[in-house]
Amino acid sequence: MEGSSSRHVALRTALLGWSPEGWRDLPWRRTRDPWAVLVSELMLQQTQVSRVLGPFEAFVRRFPDPGACAAAAAGDVVAAWAGLGYNRRAVLLHRSATQVVERHGGRLPAQLDALLALPGVGPYTARAVLVFAFGQDHGVVDTNAARVLARAVAGAPLGAHEVQARADEVVPPADAWRWNQSVLDLGATVCLRRRPRCGACPLAVAGACAWHAHGHPLPDPADGSAGVSGAQSRFAGSDRQGRGRLVAALRRGPVALAQVAHAAGWPEDPGRAERIVAALVADGLAVRRGDRLVLP
């Protein structure tokens, strides 16, 4: 236990000494508003930071709180989600806003179970809101943080329960906001999935990274560790691409059902396009009105 405690001190000292100089300048780091934090976290799911910067600021200007979002049509929220992909997140955010208004008086709850009950809010997003908005002591585990935990903290692959436990145990008391921001940025910019930049890593330089201290033995501890995502499936030619094309067309206006195959990019495969339409309707991203498809 004592050795573990000493390693935690070394980890904290090295990483917190690196921040905020090592951080990226991100607009959601300049707010502690729970709604804005939730919006940013949902936008960032499976989406590059560079694609979120502009849409985030425009979105929170248009929908500055859960009440404004809930009062709008779901289609308006989907329209404001343009450029981000994975459009179902917009529908889930609208549903979350509606529940926050109906069940929590328009204020995001500060309890883990209550946040997890909101549509589209999973363990990572719920803890991110608790840490970055409410300052609670939790470990925030996305794919970048999970990679740092497996390599630096454990030096071995971690199971699903282990990764959250390790994340929680290394959080400096009352300094979770700064710590988690540092872990996330270290994983995003230095402790990379391929070719980690160990020479620029404050943990490796300080001898506080377990994997580095043992000479980077293979296999990489991050490979197969819980929470560490692999490569995404091919986008070109996928159903995701067709869905994106069709939602983009719907943002411009109603699409005749006879034209959905063309709008999805599959003019010679109307059966595939119809399956996409059925999925969009089921997900709440589109509505059939007569012979047209429209945003909800």
Image: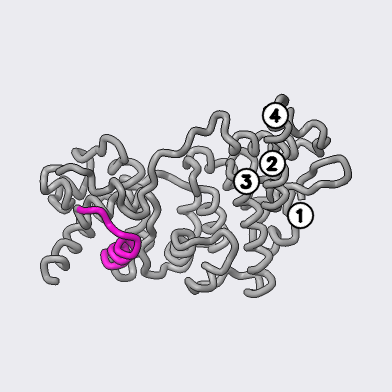
The residue that disc 1 covers is 73
The residue that disc 4 covers is 269
First to last magenta residue range: 156-170
Vertical comparison of 74 with 53: above or below: below
The residue that disc 3 covers is 87
**Do labels 1 and 3 touch, CB within 8 Å?**
no
How many residues crowd mark 1 within 10 Å: few (<14), some (14–19), many (20+)?
some
Q: Amino acid at mark 2?
A: Arg
Q: Nearer the viewer, residue 87 or 136?
A: 87
Mark found first going from the N terminus, 2 or 3: 3
Q: Amino acid at mark 3?
A: Asn
Element at label 2 = helix
> In the visual, does 85 lie left or right of 24?
right
The residue that disc 2 covers is 275
Vertical comparison of 106 with 245: above or below: below
Which image quadrant: the N terminus? bottom left
Count of marks overlaid on the render: 4
Which residue reaches farthest front? Answer: 271
Element at label 4 = loop
Q: Looking at the image, which residue is at 57% across and 34% down?
A: 238
Mark found first going from the N terminus, 3 or 4: 3
How many residues crowd mark 4 within 10 Å: few (<14), some (14–19), many (20+)?
few
x, y percent for residue 100? 63, 69
> Which is closer to the viewer, label 1 or label 4?
4
| Residue 30 disc label | none
How many residues crowd mark 3 within 10 Å: few (<14), some (14–19), many (20+)?
many
> Which is closer to the viewer, label 1 or label 3?
3
> Which is closer to the viewer, label 3 or label 4?
4
Mark pair 4, 2: CA separation: 10 Å
Mark pair 2, 3: CA separation: 17 Å
